[in-house]
């Protein structure tokens, strides 16, 4: 069983997966490649002067692959239920379990609804600042929780917030993911060289 299941392979989902796996939580991402990022050109993402959304997505995928995230590319999640000590995620290929689930399916809120996540008066999934929903240990990100603020950088931040909250629960009070240049040189030199 994996520690964290992320449903969605856009900026929110891949950011959550990156932070979780990098910090020792086995993470599986289900990615149907339907992210809006394919229609975007990034001019307003910090650190990115100008880049096609699909190219940026390829970079994100290489990052999560480098850290060892299990990416189930093209495998669509059809249902999510609470199960025992966590969640059961169903696809056409099988069932997977994890104690935590991150929903990162853009404006598609169907899985959150079937899981029983509460909604706001605006009709979006109700989540707190840590991205946790009304269902304990289930997180929602990006366009699922925002009526109109659908930006790649906001979604990536939401994914990071979800992962950091999960890490705080698992590793202790207010877990932080902060690296210094020596960390990159020592542990992630290959990835830095590719970028």
Image: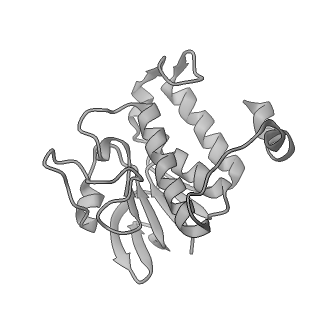
Image label count: 0
| Residue 97 in sight from this viewpoint | yes
- Of all residues, the one furthest to the bottom in this rendering is 84
| Residue 13 in sight from this viewpoint | no
Find residue 101 and report its image quarter: bottom left
In the picture, measured across the screen, residue 22 lies left or right of residue 125, that is right
- Of all residues, the one furthest to the right in this rendering is 186
Frontmost residue, 99 versus 80? 99
Give coordinates of residue 75: x percent, y percent. Answer: 46, 57
Give coordinates of residue 29: x percent, y percent. Answer: 52, 56
- Of all residues, the one furthest to the front in this rendering is 173
What residue lies at 47% left-to-right and 20% top-to-bottom? Answer: 44
Residue 136 in the image: above or below residue 144: below
In the picture, measured across the screen, residue 191 lies left or right of residue 35, that is right
Give coordinates of residue 124: x percent, y percent. Answer: 22, 48
What residue lies at 32% left-to-right and 41% top-to-bottom? Answer: 143
What residue lies at 62% left-to-right and 64% top-to-bottom? Answer: 25
What residue lies at 40% left-to-right and 50% top-to-bottom? Answer: 104
Find residue 114 and report its image quarter: bottom left
Frontmost residue, 77 versus 130? 130
In the picture, measured across the screen, residue 117 lies left or right of residue 71, that is left
Find residue 132 and report its image quarter: bottom left
Residue 42 in the image: above or below residue 28: above
Report the colour scheme. Answer: one colour
Give coordinates of residue 95: x percent, y percent. Answer: 44, 73
- Of all residues, the one furthest to the left in this rendering is 121
Quadrant where the image shows the C terminus: top right
């Amino acid at each position: 069983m994996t520690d964290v299941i992320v449903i969605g392979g856009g900026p929110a989902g891949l950011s959550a997966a990156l932070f979780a796996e990098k910090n020792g939580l086995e993470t599986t991402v289900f990615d149907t490649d339907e992210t809006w990022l394919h229609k975007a050109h990034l001019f307003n993402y910090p650190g990115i002067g100008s880049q096609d959304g699909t190219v940026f997505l390829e970079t994100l995928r290489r990052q999560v692959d480098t850290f060892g995230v299990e990416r189930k590319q093209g495998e669509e999640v059809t249902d999510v239920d609470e199960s025992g000590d966590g969640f059961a995620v169903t696809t056409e290929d099988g069932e997977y379990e994890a104690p935590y689930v991150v929903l990162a399916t853009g404006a598609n809120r169907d899985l959150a609804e079937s899981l029983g996540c509460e909604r706001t008066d605006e009709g979006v999934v109700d989540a707190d600042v840590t991205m946790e929903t009304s269902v304990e240990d289930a997180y929602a990100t990006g366009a699922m929780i925002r009526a109109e603020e659908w930006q790649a950088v906001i979604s990536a931040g939401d994914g990071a917030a979800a992962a950091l909250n999960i890490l705080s629960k698992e590793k202790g009070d207010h877990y932080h993911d902060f690296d210094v240049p020596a960390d990159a040189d020592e542990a992630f030199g290959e990835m830095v060289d590719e970028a």
